[in-house]
Image (tube, rainbow, N blue to C red):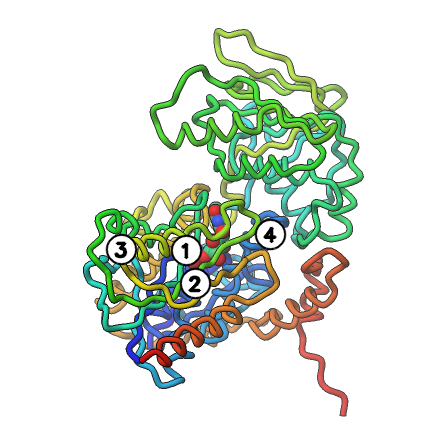
Amino acid sequence: MDITILYGTETGNAEMLAEDVQSALEDAGHEVLVENLSDVAPADLDVSRLHLVVCSTYGDGELPASAQPFGEAMKDAPDLSGLRFGIFGLGDSEYETFNMGSQQIEEMLVAAGAERIGERVTHDASGDDMAEDVALPWAEAVVEAVGADA
Amino acid sequence: MRKVAIIGAGPSGCFTAQGLLKARPDWQVDVYDSLPVPYGLVRYGVAADHQGTKGIARQFERVFERQGARFFGNVTLGREVTLEQMRAAYDAVVLATGLAGDRVPELVDDGATPEGMIGAGALTRALYDHPDAGDLPDIGGHVVILGNGNVSVDLLRLLAKSESELEGSDLSPRATKWLTSRRIDSLTIVGRSAAELAKFDPVMIRELAKLQAVTIRVADLPEGEMTDAGQEKLLSALCEIDGLSTGPLPITFRFNMPLQSIETKDGKVTGLVAGRDGAESEHLPCNALVTAIGFCCDGRLGRDAVMSGAEDAEAGRIAEGLYAAGWFRRGPRGTIPENRADSLALAAKIVGDLEATPETSRAGHDGLGLTCETVDHAGWQRLDAIEKAQAMAGRCRTKIPTRSDMLRLAQKIEELK
Ligand SMILES: Cc1cc2nc3c(=O)[nH]c(=O)nc-3n(C[C@H](O)[C@H](O)[C@H](O)COP(=O)(O)O)c2cc1C
């Protein structure tokens, strides 16, 4: 399957995770591109590829720095009907605005007509799990759901 | 293959290594630290009750585990090895040693620090088991924290927490006992600027609303609306916690109060005088004064002279083959994200600079002829595993507090046949 992983990060954790997910999916035989949301405009999204979004939360429930231009551009979003995406959030339950960054991205994409595959899954930096232990099963499940559909 | 030495394994040094190896996976990047253990302020500066923020250490583990960087702990530049030796052995040397000195109020003569006064950096290191830290001071009674930045808020929050609120942190039994057995009558946080100009992160102010045994008052708030969104956000956070009452410990925020003098009796702090010129200055009695007014060079590496002679200080280039990163370069400003961005930009600059010059053969680490005991990344992983395994109940880690134990325990124990 052709898959694009998009990450939004402030301190690099989401980027590292995106790369982990990339290697796991490549090992499973998929063709995977990884891009920073800072380098992507909504109009560039290729609806023929499955998109996996990995995004943290910063400040006070805000998008992390690298996702902010994308978030701005989504205010004037093109029609994204046909785009299928899975979403994974990084956050910290010490903050009341837990994982609101990934939630914002999810809502923006859905509002523009994209279809979310599976539930949004989150990682808690204050919890005991390693991010990749939560994210790899998420990614596999999303890919499987899309594969079963095809 | 180019060889780069990074001096300082704190966040700026590690992000520089990460950026270099991402761009040039075949380069040899060696990260040195004067401590036997890596990660600098992530380990000894980020608050013990903000473990989530320390999660970036996992990225740094990868830099050593997968990206091929090497760690050499327990090597102090200027002691075991000179800067000239480093520069001869490597194509580039990056100074990322941070700023470990506490700025002291100008009205205190050096060497005449009264009893009851301590710098935030020194206190933080003592609380977080830094091997070179002094003893935890005997502070209590009415405590004033001078300075309106996030370091002040971290200390305020820790001093205000009760035992159960420290759960999940990596505070040692000794630090826990110190924090929870102090008899603190009041905590006052005093800053020179107006409330809206304070350097607090509004999110950290709002975090104080979770404290379980405090009564918070925010004095000196301005009247009217702010036009600047950032200032408005901070003021609304301060207004939100004003009046909060969950218990007996009084916490007071004061603004517009530049320090005028520190009062002492028999060499002990008894109070301070603060206030704006012209306006009436106020006398604030206190038994302890924690200064959190910024960090400076502690004298090592002659940082101020090095940086003032830099070819391009903005870009982090000091001279050919010599660079500066993080707080060493930019001064004690900026949190992890800004310093990460700086380090990644510096890594790109180093790659460009080095590739514009013909390759010469350098000896790298082996050319230094180090004779001191060093700790490599595998040694650090052993220490890390021990610290996690020996964590006390309610703690995620219990640090090894001395250099000698670190050095001893980092050695691989030969398996018994
Ligand atoms: C200053 C700061 C603010 C944060 N704010 C939030 C927040 O509002 N909500 C949340 O769920 N996580 C928050 N986090 C936690 C981060 O999302 C979490 O540490 C994540 O792993 C960072 O990933 P990144 O390095 O890709 O940006 C915050 C972290 C910091 C240091």
The answer to the question of whether label 2 and label 3 lie on touching residues, with beta carbons closer than 8 A, is no
Q: Earlier in the sequence, mark 1 or mark 3?
A: 1
Secondary structure at badge 1 equals helix
For residue B37, say whether it is visible. yes
Image quarter of the N terminus of chain B: bottom left
Q: Tell us which disc is closer to us: 2 or 3.
A: 3
Asked if badge 1 and badge 3 are on a common chain, one would say yes
Residue that label 4 marks: B44
* Residue B108 picture location, percent across and down: 59, 26
Q: Which mark is residue A102?
A: 1
Q: Residues within 10 Å of mark 4 (few under 14, many from 20)?
A: some
Q: Tell us which disc is closer to us: 1 or 4.
A: 1
Residue that label 2 marks: A88
The answer to the question of whether label 2 and label 4 lie on touching residues, with beta carbons closer than 8 A, is no
What's the residue type where badge 4 is placed?
Tyr
Q: Earlier in the sequence, mark 2 or mark 3?
A: 2
Which chain is indicated by disc 1?
A: A
What's the residue type where badge 2 is placed?
Phe
Q: Is residue A6 left or right of residue A24?
A: left
- In 3D space, how far apart are the residues under numbered discs 2 and 1 (Cα atoms)? 7 Å
Identify which residue, B329 or A115, lies in the foreground.
Answer: A115
- In 3D space, how far apart are the residues under numbered discs 2 and 3 (Cα atoms)? 18 Å
Query: What's the residue at 42%, 67% (across, down)?
Result: A118
Quarter of image, res A117: bottom left
